[in-house]
Amino acid sequence: MEDQAEKLREIMKRKKETSPKNAPPVKPVDKARIITVTSGKGGVGKTNLSVNMALAFARLGKKVVVMDADLGLANVNVMLNMIPKYNLYHVIKKQKTIREILVETEYGISIVAGASGFSQIANMGETDRRDFIAELDTLSNADIIIIDTSAGVSSNVLDFIAAADDAVIITTPEPTAITDAYGIIKIIATEYDSVNMGLKLVVNRAKGAAQAKSVADRMINIAGQFLNLKLDYLGFIYDDVSVPHAVLRQKPFLVVDPKCKASICVQHIVERMARNKTRESSGFGAMLRRLFKPSQNEMNLV
Ligand SMILES: Nc1ncnc2c1ncn2[C@@H]1O[C@H](COP(=O)(O)OP(=O)(O)OP(=O)(O)O)[C@@H](O)[C@H]1O
Ligand SMILES: [Mg+2]
């Protein structure tokens, strides 16, 4: 045990010495729980889940930040009818810090706005991405940080997923969405060679519990059998007309219609998440350590 700790200290020390000057310092573990929301296919409900899940956590007394990490087509702020003056574009351009662009909403959650039409993030260099992720450290006084990622795979999305405490994959029952969700899970499994990434599945726009469960069972079996990857079923959300209605009004459906089927489902999902934590170490310290892992062997020690 002591051996491992010693080895770990050595790795950290080496990393500090070899990382670029502006690489983030490795800080002690703090309490923020980082949840990413990702999908294979676009338009399956990531932003709606991120925002409404944030609200449900806030109602449990948590301090929540939603970060819109989709820098191509940002939409968290649109969904909340807000036009923040600054967004992640300014952070990436190093004109602002994340803390400076953080805005309070009227719903008791804060948001970090994404940047629409900024395709460069997909091709962000290693150092820039590292700086950017290190910037997140300034949000560590939050209890929960929900990262609404773009659909599909890019190294940024994968980095976020790998670093998160919980990586929520969302799909609908449509075969195309399921295939694409499986595609992203497969890439995660291949890239990260880890049986327990804290991967969780949400089935959105389901007709009911039975349909959602059969979609989830299929995916869990395939992931287990072919990828040796543990996938937890977190729950489902009804296909509910209250969702597009709320989207049109640019308000969260949990606010517009707290008793609608979709709202009840999101509350169940959040209650389930609040009950269990998968990774032993969470928070930014842990996130940064996972992100800057030098090799798989060394990661196993972290
Ligand atoms: N549970 C639901 N019931 C009915 N409609 C839904 C539901 N969830 C999402 N939708 C519809 O799907 C649309 C897309 O949802 P959302 O913007 O959350 O998806 P997304 O995955 O974030 O999309 P993108 O990949 O473009 O970022 C919503 O505007 C809404 O009309
Ligand atoms: Mg979205």
Image (cartoon, grey):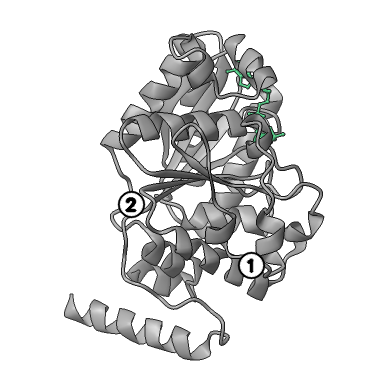
Report which residue position mark 2 lands on: 279
How many numbered callouts? 2
Q: CA distance from mark 1 to mark 2?
A: 24 Å
- Residue type at mark 1: give it: Arg
Q: What residue is shown with label 1?
A: 129
Q: Where in the figure is residue 12, as x and y percent of width and height?
A: 39, 82
Quarter holding ligand 1? top right
Residue 173's quadrant in the figure? top right
Q: Nearer the viewer, residue 220 or 106?
A: 106
Above or below: residue 298 compared with residue 77: below
What element does badge 1 sit on? helix
Which SS class for mark 2? Answer: loop
Towards the viewer: 260 or 41: 260
Vertical placement of 298 versus 89: above or below? below
- Determine the residue positioned at 57% across, 43% down: 185
- Residue 40 seen anywhere in this rendered image of the structure: no
Locate residue 33, reporting x and y percent: 38, 50
Q: Is residue 140 left or right of residue 244?
A: left
Split into 4 quadrants, where in the image is the C terminus? bottom left
Q: Residue at x 71, y 71 (%)?
A: 125
Tell me if residue 201 can be seen: yes
